[in-house]
Image: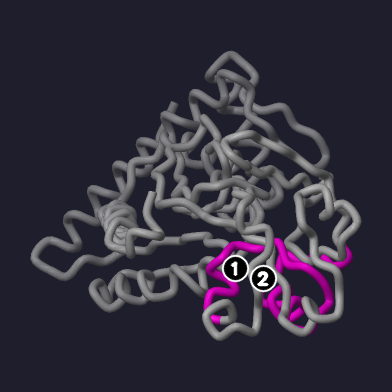
Amino acid sequence: MDTESLTLFVEIVEAGNLSEAARRLKMTRANVSYHLQRLERAAGVQLLRRTTRRAEPTEVGLRLYEHGRRIQDELRAARETVTTLGRSLRGRVRVSVPSGYGQLVLAEPLLSFKRRYPDIVLDVIFENRIEDLLRDEVDVAIRVMSEPPQSLVARRLGPVTFIACAARDYAQQHELPRDLDALRTARVVTSNAVGQQLRVSAYLNERRHEVVIEPTLISENFFFVRQAILAGIGIGLVPDYLVADDLRQGSVLRLLEQWRLSLFGSQMFMLYMPSRQHTRAISTFIDFMVRAAGERPAGARD
């Protein structure tokens, strides 16, 4: 089994299908298929389960992929060590961050990292979905959740506080919820839960309560959600950092303050693949962001 075949196999797994792997490798699909068949004959087992759209590794294929990925990462790290010896730190980091949290909370740490390491290419994607790190070629993802996936390495960055709130004008014209159950019939504005009922968990005097709500406006764009709250469309269920300035200015009022709310999770985690040997650039980025989280004010810490 040669290194070239192993590299091709890693590319197929990460691409998700033979056509995409061929595009990335600048080969024909037939050529990629031919080399894959040779590799499977040499291994004596099936390495991929193929359909018209997907190529999923078998158990043996997944183990081979992990070995191949480690070899590639170690070679990349070795090349990086040689090329950066005696020079400023170089490399590339592709990071996925939640849209609202990324812009309102992480923007300054991300820019501080870039100022400190100007020769590292920082590729920042703003999105809210829990993507597959393997297939989307993301080095690091930052996400809100209660418990991180066991298949990923998770570094805790701190808590996320969700609140109920409403514009002052809305509060003056409508009856406001006095307890959690009132949210069932309220006009709620919040982010989306794709393919799921939206369940709000809450704690009052350490007792857990839960209610299913049907929002009147849903969007994964948190800035649009904030605009809707300010426009008096309904009661917002959002992270507190989204309306922090509005709360201070008094244009937005906090509701149900005695309840501790949770929608999509109560912690912010940094996630990355356990099987990958990180480059110095990626490792430096991870350490920098963990330190930055620890240096935020006490109210934002874990």
Range of magenta residues: 216-245
- The span from disc 1 to disc 2 (Cα, nearest Å) is 7 Å
Task: Classify mark 1: residues with Cα within 10 Å, few (<14), some (14-19) or many (20+).
Answer: some
Residue furthest out toward the top:
44
On whether residue 247 falls in the magenta region, the answer is no
Q: Residue at x 88, y 54 (%)?
A: 214
- Residue at the spot 62% in from the left edge and 42% down from the top edge: 204
Frontmost residue, 244 versus 39: 244
- Sequence-first disc among 1 and 2: 1
| Residue contact at pointers 1 and 2, CB within 8 angstroms | yes
Question: What residue type is disc 1 on?
Answer: Ser
Specify whether 41 is left or right of 93: right
Residue that carries the numbered disc 1 in the rendered image: 99
Q: Quadrant of residue 75?
A: top left
Q: Looking at the rendering, in which quadrant would you find the N terminus?
A: top left
Q: Which residue type does callout 2 highlight?
A: Phe
